[in-house]
Amino acid sequence: MSQPNSTPVRVVGLAGSLRQGSYNRALLRAAQGMAPEGMTIEIFDLLAVPLYNADVEAAGDPEGVAALKAAIRAADSVLFVTPEYNHGVPGVMKNAVDWASRPPREAPLGAKPVGIIGASPGMTGSARGQSQLRQAFEFTNSYCMPQPEILVFRAHEKFDAEGRLTDEGTAKFLGVYLEAFKAWTLRFKAG
């Protein structure tokens, strides 16, 4: 259902790298700072989310997992900012998806609009990692925005030593992406 463009949009952003100097954490902070009017991006740190274990889940969600699920439920959409490790999605990011896909019929990711962006020092800009993440969202029944895509390649040339996005072309395209993601989220937001 479409809503007026003035409807506020709450996004939770997840970076798939735990490294403080991560280009993906920097890209998420840049997105947070460039969010269009009417959109807020809350960053959720995945550091406190343990590896998925069905035995642990059966005993009750650990505090970090409960917080992750609550953040996703409270948000209108989720922005996944993923690096690419060994031609795929990193374990940190996949682990967050695994926890947020549980329990199957009541999962926080179920029917949730999601977006994927990513950065990498390589030339493919996390394309393979993003592709694998899209496949996971088919199972979680999440509404993954198909276009535009952001594949920040040669990320080491696009951020300064403090992690600020300095590349004008990337910043401009990130702005276009965020406007599109806001519109995508509004397509699914209930009145």
Image: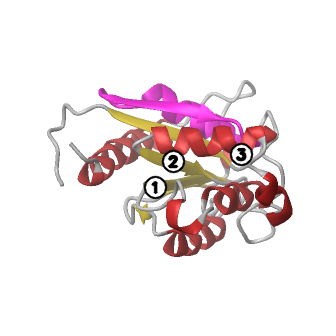
In this rendering, position of residue 91 left or right of residue 29? right
User: Residue 174's x, y, as percent?
Assistant: 44, 43
Residue sitting at 60 percent across and 53 percent down?
Answer: 118
Q: Which mark is residue 79?
A: 2
Q: Nearer the viewer, mark 3 or mark 1?
A: 3
Say whether residue 134 is left or right of residue 52. left
How many residues crowd mark 1 within 10 Å: few (<14), some (14–19), many (20+)? many
Figure colour scheme:
secondary structure
Q: Residue at x 32, y 42 (%)?
A: 179
The reply to whether dot 2 and dot 1 touch (C-beta < 8 Å) is: yes
Mark 2 vs mark 1, CA separation in Å? 6 Å
- Residue type beneath disc 2: Leu
Which segment is the magenta one? 22-46
Where residue 55 appears, x then y in whole percent? Answer: 85, 63
Q: Is residue 37 magenta?
A: yes
Quadrant placement of the N terminus: bottom left
* CA gap, disc 3 and disc 2: 17 Å
- 142, above or below 114, in the image: below
Look at mark 3 in the image and give the residue it sits on: 65
Residue 48 part of the magenta-drawn span = no
**Amino acid residing under circle 1:** Val
Which residue is depicted at the point 23% across and 33% down? 7
Q: Is residue 68 left or right of residue 87?
A: left
Name the residue rendered at 62%, 56% in the picture: 100
Number of disc labels: 3
